[in-house]
Image (cartoon, grey):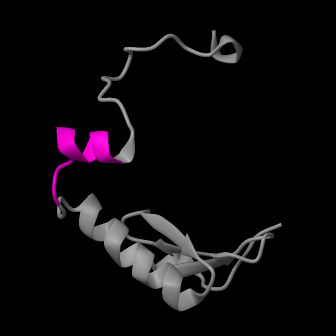
């Protein structure tokens, strides 16, 4: 069972959640954005990046990026739902 190390009642700050697998989740209380890492420092670095992207930072994904990563450009709803979701 995961456990938190901060009281989020004031609506700001970062809550650290120690996961059962040993990883640590850092959650920004104000935005609800969360990320994780093996240490608090790594979780905070990943959280900072996630918040930047959440707020519109970063570069858009291009066709070349998708090709490099071996992914296909699909729109939501382009594929059939898996059987268990039908």
The N terminus, quarter of image? bottom right
Q: Is residue 75 left or right of residue 23?
A: left
In the image, farthest residue toward the bottom:
41
User: What residue is drawn where x is 35% and y is 30%?
Assistant: 72
What number of labels is visible?
A: 0
Judge whether 38 appears above or below 30 on screen.
Answer: below
User: What residue is drawn where x is 55% and y is 71%?
Assistant: 36
User: What residue is drawn where x is 66% and y is 85%?
Assistant: 5
Question: Within the magenta stretch, is there residue 9?
Answer: no
| In-front residue for pair 21/15 | 21
| In-front residue for pair 5/59 | 59
The C terminus, quarter of image? top right
* Main secondary structure of the magenta stretch: helix
**Highlighted range, magenta:** 59-68
| In-front residue for pair 19/80 | 80
List x then y, in percent, for residue 67: 29, 39
User: What residue is drawn where x is 76% and y is 77%?
Assistant: 22
Task: Give residue 39's quadrant in the image.
Answer: bottom right
Task: Give residue 38's quadrant in the image.
Answer: bottom right
Q: Is residue 59 left or right of residue 65?
A: left
Can residue 81 be seen from the camera position used here? yes
List x then y, in percent, for residue 24: 64, 78
Task: Give residue 77's quadrant in the image.
Answer: top left
| In-front residue for pair 55/60 | 60
Can residue 13 be seen from the camera position used here? no
List x then y, in percent, for residue 44: 46, 83
List x then y, in percent, for residue 2: 76, 70
Judge whether 47 appears above or below 78 on screen.
Answer: below
């Amino acid at each position: 069972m995961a456990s938190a190390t901060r009281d989020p009642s004031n609506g700001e700050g970062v809550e650290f959640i120690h996961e059962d697998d040993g990883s640590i989740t850092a959650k920004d209380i104000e935005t609800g954005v969360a990320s994780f890492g093996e240490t608090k420092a790594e979780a905070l670095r990943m959280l900072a990046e996630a918040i930047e992207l959440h707020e519109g930072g970063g570069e858009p994904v291009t066709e070349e990026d998708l090709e490099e990563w071996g992914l296909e450009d699909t729109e939501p709803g382009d594929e059939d739902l898996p059987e268990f979701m039908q």
